[in-house]
Image (cartoon, rainbow, N blue to C red):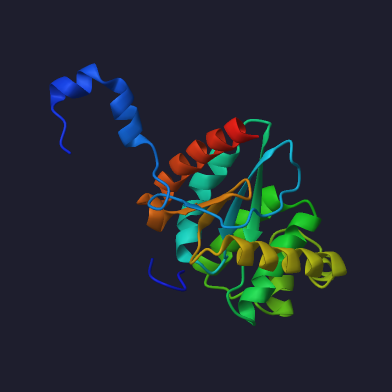
Amino acid sequence: MDRRQFSKITAVSLATTPALVAAQDRPVEGRHYTALSSRQPTLDPKQVEVLEFFAYSCEHCNAFEPTIDAWQKKLPADVRFRRIPVAFRDGPMVVQQKLFFAIEALGQVERLHRKVFIAIHTDRLRLDKPDDVAGFATKNGIDPASLLSALNSFSVAAKAKQAIALATGYKFQGTPSIGVDGRWLTSGSMAGSNEKSLTVAEYLIGLAKQRS
């Protein structure tokens, strides 16, 4: 979902100049990623923070979820991965944004995050009203009252507000996008595909560790 639609070397020389090959493969600032003009806050300065900006209603985020979930599970201990749901406008997207934080508050992200995508994109449920959220909870073995209470809690409202601040600071144009260490942003449109954006993110993680 987008707010805006985002020297030739011989075989011999490639074989004899591996450093040049590595340089060619290296992501390029301004093309594969952008550097933020103002560094954004992270939760722990001792960890490199990776953010996935996503929206449950985004079909590209839905398709990307299994890939990025498998990727983030293999990140080293000194890298913190966080999902940041975004709402480009008021209404249904705000409810779905808060739904993620409510699931997180109940400690059910591992079990329910993917199921929200399935409910919206496969089962064609909107999940933008209390009754819809309650029905989703019941279907998946969660107490509806507990999920709705979390959805409407002060803590979830505060996290939604923080997500808006991060989205504003990173200045991304669509979802999914990946922020790294409060310094850089990449996305499928910049990297060439959502899968390639993970390769760029790995490069940026390494860069962050060098500069820490």
Give how far across and how far down residue 121 sits, in percent.
50, 66
Residue 74 visible at all: no
Compared with 92, 172 (above or below) is above
Residue 38 horizontal side relative to residue 131, left or right: left
Identify which residue, 181 or 110, lies in the foreground: 181
Could you tell me residue 145's position as x and y percent?
A: 84, 69
Identify the residue at horizontal 74%, vertical 69% (top origin).
161
- Above or below for 153 versus 209: below
Number of numbered discs overlaid on the protein picture: 0
Horizontal and vertical percent for residue 45? 74, 40
One can see residue 73 in this view: yes
**Between 59 and 81, the one nearer to me in the picture:** 81
Residue at x 44%, y 40% (from the top left corner)? 199
Query: What residue is at 49 percent from the left and 66 percent from the top?
Result: 174
Is 148 or 61 nearer to us in this picture?
61
Determine whether, in the image, residue 57 is placed left or right of residue 142.
left
Q: Compared with residue 209, is residue 62 higher up or lower down, i.e. above or below?
A: below
Up the image or down, 153 lies above or below 30; here it is: below
Q: Residue furthest bottom?
A: 91
Quadrant in which the C terminus is drawn: top right
Quadrant assignment, res 60: bottom left
Identify the residue at image location x=34%, y=32%. Answer: 23
